[in-house]
Image: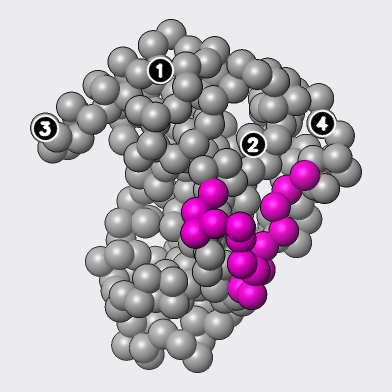
Amino acid sequence: MKFKDVEKTCKIYSKIGLSRLILSAGMPRSGSTLMYNIIRQVLLRKYSGALSSGWIEEIYDLPSADVFLIKTHHLDRFKAIRANHIFYSYRDIRDALVSMSRKFKCKPSLAIAREWIDQFYFAKKCARIMIRYEDMASDISSTILSIAQCLDAQSNIDEITASLPVVDAQTEIDSPYSKVTLLHNNHVTGTISGEWRTILDETLQKQLISEFGDWFQEHQYPLS
């Protein structure tokens, strides 16, 4: 871990103090912001005004509170040791690469996929629950219930579902970025499961299957 990262983590520790820390982590483009908002709504009902929540890069601007909910895409042992609860979302890395490419106009690569898989396995060691994007998208009620149970919180599934932001590929939000929901314009790319077959370079597809074939099969993703 680089010194600047250690220094940054120490500043986070200082900001949080003795408050409870809940990390909403996740593979990029895996529905992690939706998961964050589910956790936020559950915690709002449990802790009300005692909750402070936001993106990790903005933690220094958050008001002090008894409980912090922080969203991040990068886990390390320092954050994992300090956190009281960690939630992690993941997705078929091939579809996540397609969504990333559309969102950030960057080229999908094996190196990026390796970073995501490394983070996945680290998260698997320390997260309370691992949330599969495809399951969350198809059955959000079960996801809400699982999160509430992990947090030992009451859950009115219909109420929480209704409180979640409704966003699709065509949605424009009130401002370029919401510090409440952490959503921004063009946040959702509309990438559908299996779209990687027609978007990703065939050579990259073969490399991913060759290197991560066991991971795909273990998590119920097709090899072809």
Report the span colored magenta: 163-178
Mark 2 residue type: Ile
Mark 1 residue type: Ile
Instruction: Give percent across and percent down for residue 39.
Output: 64, 36
For the point 47% across and 68% down, which residue is it? 96
Extreme residue toward the front, this view: 174
Mark 4 residue type: Ser
Q: Which label sits on residue 39?
A: 2
* Front tag of 3 and 1: 1
Return the residue at label 3.
3
Crowding near the residue tagged with mark 2, few <14, some 14–19, many ≥20 C-alpha atoms within 10 Å: many
Instruction: Give percent across and percent down for residue 130.
Output: 57, 44
Q: Which label sits on residue 155?
A: 4
Q: Earlier in the sequence, mark 4 or mark 3?
A: 3
The CA span between labels 4 and 2 is 11 Å
The answer to which of 146 and 154 lies nearer the viewer is 154
The CA span between labels 1 and 4 is 26 Å
The CA span between labels 2 and 1 is 18 Å
Q: Earlier in the sequence, mark 1 or mark 4?
A: 1
The CA span between labels 4 and 3 is 41 Å
Quarter holding the N terminus is top left
For the point 46% across and 87% down, which residue is it? 199
Q: Earlier in the sequence, mark 4 or mark 2?
A: 2
The answer to which of 78 and 174 lies nearer the viewer is 174
Return the residue at label 1.
16
User: What kind of colouring is applied to the model shown?
Assistant: one colour
Task: Classify residue 143 by image quadrant.
Answer: top right
